[in-house]
Image (tube, grey):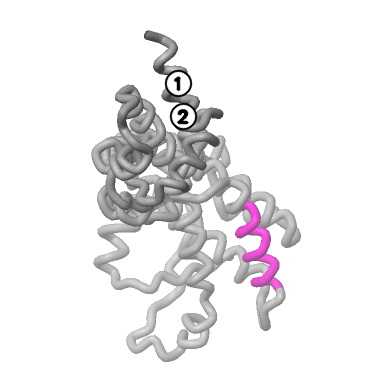
């Protein structure tokens, strides 16, 4: 039988885990309790909490490839640790599944949506005879969880993008950074950068540069404006650098661009 240790009191377990998980479905049983916790100090000290927290972060915001790599590295490292057993590895799997129950519950989903008709989690894990089978099954399971979370986060990602673009359009003339925008939309800069690259196909710097160059093109409709004036107006303090990036963006020097405008009229 796979054993699972819950480091919380009875009230928390009832109020949280019982909301997101059917213990009969998980085939869990209470294996005992400790009043002072001294007998489980070793278990707690060796519990891979850091790695599991990293996995939670990846499920919420990471790439699928990163999740697969993390699982492979995590379980192989676990298997090399002292006194590691197959039962212990499978108990970690059950803990991960409980975490996924909680994550899915945040998005009003249930774990059954991920299981594809596989009902008894203990029976599934008991049939996995070696480490590679465990890794493959957990990777497949976690990627299905990731896909559901990703789909449910679409409206939120769209809102982040809309807020970011609005911020850039209103502040491109200032010295702005990914960190300042991330603070504005209340998202970690690394996570926000991933969202922008995945959804828009550009990183933050490229988006800001594009907005600035399009604004510069409009300002140059007044051909009397000097490069330094235009550069300052779009948030670039160095006129020479502005000229370089403008040519790279448009394929023309600022003079050539102004001449092309003049030839229209």
Q: How far apart are marks 2 and 1 (CA)?
A: 6 Å
| Rendering coords of residue 234 (x, y %) | 32, 40
Instruction: Let me know if residue 69 is in the magenta part.
Output: yes
Q: Which quarter of the figure has residue 76?
A: bottom right
Q: Which of 137 and 172 is in front in this view?
A: 172
| Rendering coords of residue 222 (x, y %) | 30, 24
- Kindly identify the residue that appears in the image at 62 percent across and 67 percent down: 89
Position of residue 53 relative to residue 227, above or below, is below
Question: Is 157 left, or right, of 169 in this rendering?
Answer: right
- Please tell me whether the stretch drawn in magenta is mainly helix, strand or loop: helix
| Rendering coords of residue 221 (x, y %) | 33, 22
Which residue is most to the top? 265
Tag 1 secondary structure? helix
Tag 2 secondary structure? helix
Q: Which segment did they paint magenta?
A: 68-79
| Rendering coords of residue 66 (x, y %) | 60, 53
Q: Which quarter of the figure has residue 133?
A: bottom right
Split into 4 quadrants, where in the image is the C terminus? top left
- Kindly identify the residue that appears in the image at 62 percent across and 45 percent down: 140
Name the residue carrying label 2.
255
Name the residue carrying label 1.
259
Crowding around mark 1 (Cα neighbors within 10 Å: few <14, some 14 to 19, many 20+) is few
Q: Contact, CB < 8 Å: mark 2 with mark 1?
A: yes
């Amino acid at each position: 039988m796979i054993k699972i240790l819950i480091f919380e009191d009875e009230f928390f377990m009832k109020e949280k885990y019982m909301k997101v998980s059917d213990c009969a479905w998980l085939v869990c049983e209470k294996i005992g309790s400790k009043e002072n916790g001294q007998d489980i100090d070793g278990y707690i000290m060796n519990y891979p909490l850091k790695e599991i927290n990293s996995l939670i972060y990846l499920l919420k915001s990471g790439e699928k490839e990163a999740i697969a790599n993390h699982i492979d590295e995590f379980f192989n490292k676990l298997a090399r640790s002292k006194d590691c057993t197959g039962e212990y590895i499978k108990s970690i799997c059950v803990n991960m599944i409980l975490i996924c129950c909680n994550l899915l519950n945040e998005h009003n989903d249930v774990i059954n949506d991920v299981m594809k008709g596989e009902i008894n989690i203990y029976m599934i894990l008991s049939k996995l005879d070696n480490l590679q089978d465990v890794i493959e099954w957990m990777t497949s399971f976690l990627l299905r969880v990731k896909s559901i979370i990703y789909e449910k986060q679409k409206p939120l990602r769209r809102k982040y993008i809309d807020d970011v673009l609005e911020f850039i359009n209103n502040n491109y003339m200032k010295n702005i950074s990914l960190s300042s925008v991330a603070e504005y939309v209340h998202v970690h800069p690394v996570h926000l950068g991933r969202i922008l690259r995945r959804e828009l196909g550009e990183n933050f710097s490229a988006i800001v540069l594009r907005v600035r160059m399009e604004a510069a093109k409009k300002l140059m409709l007044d051909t009397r404006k000097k490069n330094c004036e235009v550069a300052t107006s779009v948030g670039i303090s160095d006129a020479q650098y502005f000229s370089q990036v403008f040519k790279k963006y448009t394929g023309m020097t600022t003079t050539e661009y102004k001449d092309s405008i003049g030839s229209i009229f």
